[in-house]
Image (cartoon, rainbow, N blue to C red):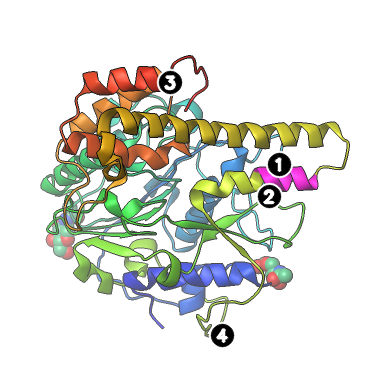
């Protein structure tokens, strides 16, 4: 069987059903067979981005490391794979297996060999744009690798992140990669004839809305996202695989819980995946079925993944121990912080939307962009953050509110007053 791009979804669902069971996660072509079908003879490039840092976000960096192994197995060269990851997992004091990152129950190390192109402080949006556009002069730190691609080349971009409405990805450091800036960069790259075709895969909450109504379909770009603009992407946790294994999440069978969307040039869905990620040898001869598994699993929203992580830490700690005490406090803090954020947005909604508060989280009809004025959107987020602190992962579930404020003409000054009121005497970040 040949793996077409649009079947990527099926592969991802498959990965989940494997995680639930006892088998290791196979790479896509291991499942679909050796696939040399590849009409494009240029160089294959890839950019891999983990949008978060911290041990409780283990899965994002683990996913990126796994993607690197898949590409490497497909024959891509290190010089053509550019990795953005904060790199605080393998040697994290919480890692029971120092120096190793796994993303499957079989404990295969996926960290091995991963190029440390942009790590720590230099995992910024600015460097991401420099890498994408192939502009070394715009880089600040890092390995200096950029996508120095030509008209016959393919580019594969993969993000693993919590996601938030309006941005492609948070970056571990500094500003997010906002959708309008990203699409501008893609248009420029297309105009510069710097690729033949590009595939972008986003694994994050509410990732669909990013492209809704703003990605032209004539850029030779195919985008698939783990969720549409209305729904969260879900993380999957497999309890009981091994208590010493940190929580490892992946995306659920999206055909039922989180519809996958395609954007851009959807005809490219018929391209073979090997065109972008290279062929890899067959390790599994069997054909697998894609029946949903019935083994015990927990489905949780990506955004709640860290809550689950904290709950499990608490359960794991022995009764009466200092760890138990600390774990309880971390969980209490997280819950209190979430309540605080909910309250703040509730108040801001009262101030600015009044009786129309329900429209604060309104979704525009499909095909319409999230917001008409992207500068307004960015400005309002900054205005809020200047009064109330940086939006947390949980807080980002409210970014749609800022878009809706712009769409109904609420000004920066109005939001400033409202945020000041709502966040008065509250020092903690929201
Ligand atoms: C884990 O992976 C190794 C190497 O691919 C394989 O030999 C082994 O059988 C796997 N173990 C399980 C339990 O699947
Ligand atoms: C791209 O491919 C075409 C057709 O094979 C070839 O003529 C051309 O020289 C290639 N361009 C580059 C920059 O490699």
Q: Can residue 146 be seen?
A: no
The residue pinned by badge 3 equals: 423
Specify which label sits upstream in the sequence, 2 or 1. 1
Prevalent SS, magenta region: helix
Furthest toward the right, the residue is 320
Quadrant assignment, res 344: top left
Which is more foreground, mark 4 or mark 3? Answer: 3
Q: Which residue is mark 1?
A: 95
Residue 168 in view, yes or no: yes
Looking at the image, in which quadrant does ligand 2 appear? bottom left
Q: Which mark is residue 286?
A: 4
| Residue contact at pointers 2 and 1, CB within 8 angstroms | yes
Q: Earlier in the sequence, mark 1 or mark 4?
A: 1
Query: Disc 2 designates what residue?
Result: 246
Quadrant where the N terminus is found in the figure:
bottom left
Say which of 414 and 130 sits in front.
414
Q: Quadrant of residue 134?
A: top left
* Percent of width and height locating residue 301: 50, 54
Neighbours of disc 2 within 10 Å: few (<14), some (14-19), many (20+): many
Check contact, mark 4 vs mark 3: CB within 8 A.
no
Tell how many labels.
Answer: 4
Callout in the foreground (1, 4): 1
């Amino acid at each position: 069987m040949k793996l077409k791009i649009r079947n990527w979804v099926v592969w991802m669902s498959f990965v989940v059903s494997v995680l639930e069971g006892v088998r290791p996660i196979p790479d896509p072509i291991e499942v679909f067979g050796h696939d040399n079908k590849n009409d494009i003879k240029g160089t294959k490039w890839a950019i891999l981005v983990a949008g978060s840092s911290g041990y409780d976000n283990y899965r994002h960096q683990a996913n990126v490391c796994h993607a690197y192994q898949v590409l490497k197995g497909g024959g891509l060269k290190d010089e053509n794979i550019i990795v953005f990851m904060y790199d605080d997992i393998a040697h994290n004091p919480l890692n029971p297996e120092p120096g190793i990152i796994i993303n499957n129950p079989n404990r295969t190390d996926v960290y091995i060999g991963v190029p440390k192109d942009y790590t720590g402080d230099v995992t910024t949006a600015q460097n991401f744009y420099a890498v994408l556009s192939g502009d070394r002069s715009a880089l600040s730190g890092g390995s200096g690798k950029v996508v120095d691609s030509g008209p016959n080349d393919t580019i594969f971009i993969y993000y693993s992140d919590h996601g938030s409405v309006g941005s492609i990805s948070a970056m571990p450091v500094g500003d997010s990669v906002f959708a309008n800036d990203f699409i501008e960069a893609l248009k420029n790259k297309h105009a510069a004839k710097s690729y033949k075709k590009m595939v972008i895969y986003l694994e994050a909450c509410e990732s669909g809305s990013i492209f809704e109504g703003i990605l032209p379909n004539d850029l030779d770009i195919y985008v698939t996202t783990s969720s549409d603009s209305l729904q969260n992407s879900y993380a999957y946790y497999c309890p009981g695989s091994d208590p010493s294994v940190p929580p490892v999440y992946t995306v659920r069978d999206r055909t039922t819980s989180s519809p996958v969307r395609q954007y851009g040039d959807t005809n490219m869905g018929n391209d073979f995946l090997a065109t972008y990620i290279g062929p890899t040898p067959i390790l599994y001869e069997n054909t697998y079925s894609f029946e949903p598994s019935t083994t015990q699993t927990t489905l949780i929203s990506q955004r709640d993944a860290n809550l689950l992580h904290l709950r499990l830490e608490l359960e794991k700690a022995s009764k009466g121990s200092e760890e138990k005490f600390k774990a309880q406090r971390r969980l209490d803090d997280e819950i209190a912080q979430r309540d605080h954020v909910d309250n703040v947005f509730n108040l801001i909604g009262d101030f600015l939307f009044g009786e129309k508060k329900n429209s604060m989280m309104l979704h525009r009809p499909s095909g319409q962009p999230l917001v008409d004025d992207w500068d307004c959107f960015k400005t309002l987020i900054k205005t809020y953050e200047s009064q109330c602190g940086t939006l947390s992962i949980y807080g980002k579930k409210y970014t749609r509110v800022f878009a809706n404020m712009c769409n109904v003409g609420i000004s920066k000054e109005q939001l400033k007053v409202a945020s000041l009121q709502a966040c008065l005497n509250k020092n903690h970040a929201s």
